[in-house]
């Protein structure tokens, strides 16, 4: 037998829980870091709209739950009402969420298509390789073409299995996992090709609003344009094993001249192997 006081306590607990949840989000303390990419504004907008809609529904539903638990708490003199069907109510809670969710999915899908459109021809190209639990990088060099790779050619000295017979490989610049940093230009479209050597990883740069999975056996890609120079953190956003939390990297966004100067100072495949 429930004591009426339990109804009061539970109603109060739910109400306080909702209050703390709403206030902690509204305080902005755990909000996204400042935006530094062109497409990111649209992502932030979609994120905010989604959070507002779901937040209002969350507060209303749980507020109503708290009220009902308190208002209709146990009373031995009262019998529970039993309602079999309520057509209007059922239609409302089916149709209204369906319309809202469809609108969110359609606008999200359009944004997805916009972000994942083919990269422009003048984009800066780079390859990011994920492996437990580090990031590796490869630049195509002056010819703009990556050399062929083959997992069977992987050795300690050639960690990406670059085919040294391929002429396009000669000017490639690569940094084995955990060595070197990602150096990219500001105000220019960058296409990042993503490859995984072992398991699923996810390339996540919060400030650029970039997050894309790396899938073993296929190459995924992401195009973005950074709007601010500076150092940004790369994190792995896919639980990829015990050391997942250590899988961090550094991305430096610099001017085009600085990036070209830096690239010219790096050793190429030809420097290393020929
Ligand atoms: Cu990972």
Image (cartoon, helix red, strand yellow):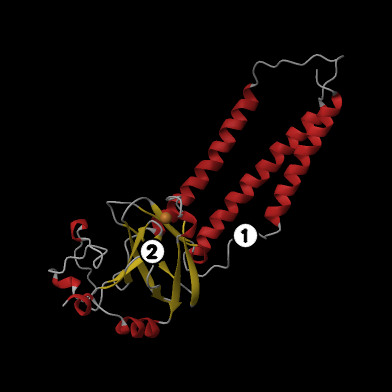
Residue 246, can we see it? yes
* Residue depicted at 53% across the width and 42% down the height: 101
* Residue depicted at 19% across the width and 64% down the height: 148
Q: Is residue 172 left or right of residue 18?
A: left
Quarter of the image where ligand 1 sits: bottom left
Quarter of the view holding residue 172:
bottom left
Within-10-Å neighbours for mark 2: few <14, some 14–19, many 20+: many
* Residue depicted at 39% across the width and 67% down the height: 178
Element at badge 2? strand
Circles 1 and 2 in contact, beta carbons < 8 Å: no
The x, y position of residue 146, in whole percent, is 23, 68
Element at badge 1? loop
Residue 228, can we see it? no
Q: Which residue is mark 1?
A: 31
Q: Which residue is mark 2?
A: 135
Whether 107 is drawn above or below 190: the answer is above
Within-10-Å neighbours for mark 1: few <14, some 14–19, many 20+: few
């Amino acid at each position: 037998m429930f004591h009426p006081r339990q109804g009061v306590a539970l109603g109060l607990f739910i109400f306080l829980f909702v209050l703390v949840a709403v206030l902690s989000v509204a305080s902005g303390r755990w909000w996204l870091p400042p935006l530094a990419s062109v497409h990111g504004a649209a992502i932030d907008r979609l994120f905010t709209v989604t959070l507002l809609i779901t937040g209002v529904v969350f507060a209303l539903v749980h507020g109503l739950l708290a009220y009902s638990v308190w208002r209709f708490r146990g009373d031995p003199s009262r019998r529970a009402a039993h309602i079999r069907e309520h057509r209007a109510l059922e239609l409302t809670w089916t149709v209204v969420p369906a319309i809202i969710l469809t609108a969110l999915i359609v606008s999200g899908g359009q944004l997805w298509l916009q972000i994942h459109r083919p990269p422009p021809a003048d984009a800066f190209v780079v390859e990011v390789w994920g492996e437990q639990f580090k990031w590796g990088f490869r630049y195509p060099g002056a010819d703009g073409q990556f050399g062929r790779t083959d997992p069977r050619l992987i050795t300690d000295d050639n960690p990406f299995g670059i085919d040294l017979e391929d002429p396009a490989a000669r000017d490639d610049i690569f940094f084995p996992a955990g060595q070197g940093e990602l150096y990219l230009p500001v105000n220019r479209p960058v296409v990042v090709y993503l490859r995984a050597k072992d398991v699923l990883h996810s390339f996540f740069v919060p400030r650029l609003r970039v997050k894309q999975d790396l899938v073993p056996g296929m190459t995924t890609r992401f195009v973005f344009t950074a709007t601010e120079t500076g150092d940004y953190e790369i994190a792995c956003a896919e639980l990829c094993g015990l050391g997942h939390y250590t899988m961090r990297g550094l991305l430096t966004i610099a001017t085009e001249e600085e990036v070209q100067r830096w690239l010219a100072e790096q050793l190429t495949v030809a420097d290393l192997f020929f």
